[in-house]
Amino acid sequence: MKTFERKVGTVSRGIRCPIIRQGDNLAEIAVNSVLEASRDEGFPLHDRDVIAITESVVARSQGNYAKIGDIAADVRAKTGGGTVGVIFPILSRNRFAICLRGIAGGCKKVVLMLSYPSDEVGNALVSWDQVDDAGVNPYSDVLDEQRYRSLFGSNPHEFTGVDYVSYYREIIEQSGAEAQIVFANRPKTILEYTDTVIACDIHTRKRTKRILRDAGARVVLGLDDILNAPVSGSGFNEKYGLLGSNKATEETVKLFPNECRALVLEVQKRILEATGKHVEVMVYGDGAFKDPQGKIWELADPVVSPGFTDGLIGTPNELKLKYLADNDFAALSGEALRDAISASIKAKDADLKGRMVSEGTTPRQLTDLIGSLCDLTSGSGDKGTPIVLVQGYFDNYTTA
């Protein structure tokens, strides 16, 4: 019987490294950390291993920070500083609350329009059962704050315990602006209150902005249009603006990292020079997965990966082994089955799109799949592993 030397498939390792500060040579630190882990833990590097670096330390090394005053100044300059509609933000102390402080600081009045029963990524204001019991149609019904309270009362977030309606109102008012809160799911509803709008949704922002422009809005911005250039020397992100930002302190945000291409290529080059191995490298943020308990979709960043080497372009091209075993080779077992499946893998077409034999093999972008694995490996707490080494991801059943 033929014996396969490889008994392990994909392995994901969190790699510890020093705390990253602004100005640090992140490429050097990442390479040294991986090489030291390889030496100390006794595992070799291979061609097509993936070294992934979390976006947080990339932005930190770039010093990509901004103050709430910078946000306020940009909002005031781009909207005129009067009554501004702020629509479809996510419910997050870390992601949006500090951005709202900056936005409100640049306006006289904020009309905050919250989607319901949940935000774009699944954080619930109320449950669907509550909506059904109230006889409300969230696709058409517009609620003011008084009506919302009469129907639903106070609904602290399941995980944070925060009543986001009260919390966001307090932020706006403490920033010196008048606050009005409405609940609706149609973008055009905001135009009943103001013709100047900041669309704060992440993945649906292009559609939202198009609808508003077509409906005659005077000023339409997205979070990606705020701090997309420096304000008084602040950090910025040319492509994503405030999207992907996180709270750094009570007065500052850390923005999504700027151009990452040079970093991933430098890490790839240094590993090749040090080991002779051609690895792939990526920067990753939130993974693209959904929590079954809280119904929250993790991806609050605009993309999973803002930068990666060319070997990570594309989607998997894989055969479904259980399909082969249950259909094409249902009469085989043991070594004969293994050999038949191995032969099929070796002879598979370069593009299996639409083929039943590849059905259910998750045809998502490699960077989304690997980035999600890395996000789950590193976590968002105190693991101290902002670099992840993924080995064997591109292997298959035939790899010895």
Image (tube, rainbow, N blue to C red):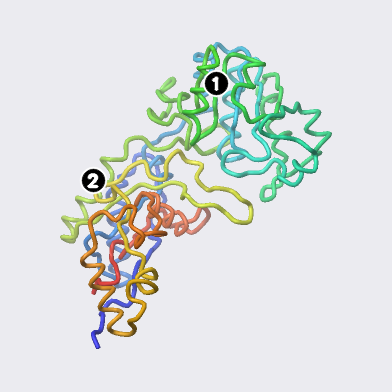
Give the image quarter of residue 237: top left
231 lies above or below 114? above
Along the horizontal axis of the image, is 171 left or right of 145? left
Report x, y in % for residue 315: 32, 51
**Disc 1 vs disc 2: which is toward the camera?**
2
Q: Is residue 43 left or right of residue 104?
A: left
* Circle nearer the N terminus (1, 2): 1
Residue bearing mark 1:
72
Real-space Cα distance between discs 1 and 2? 36 Å
Q: Can you give x and y, in whole percent of width and height, for residue 152 in the image?
A: 79, 39
Q: Which mark is residue 243?
A: none
Q: Position of residue 234 (x, y in %)?
A: 43, 26
Q: Nearer the viewer, residue 194 or 354?
A: 354
Amino acid carrying mark 2 in the image: Leu
- Which quadrant of the rendered structure holds the C terminus? bottom left
Q: Secondary structure at mark 2?
A: helix
Residue 293 screen position, x and y as percent:
63, 56
* Three-letter amino acid code at the position of disc 1: Ala
The answer to whether 390 is drawn above or below residue 70 in the figure is below
Crowd around label 1: few <14 · some 14–19 · many ≥20 (10 Å):
many
Residue at image coords 23%, 85%:
2
The image's mark for residue 265 is 2
Looking at the figure, which quarter contains the N terminus? bottom left
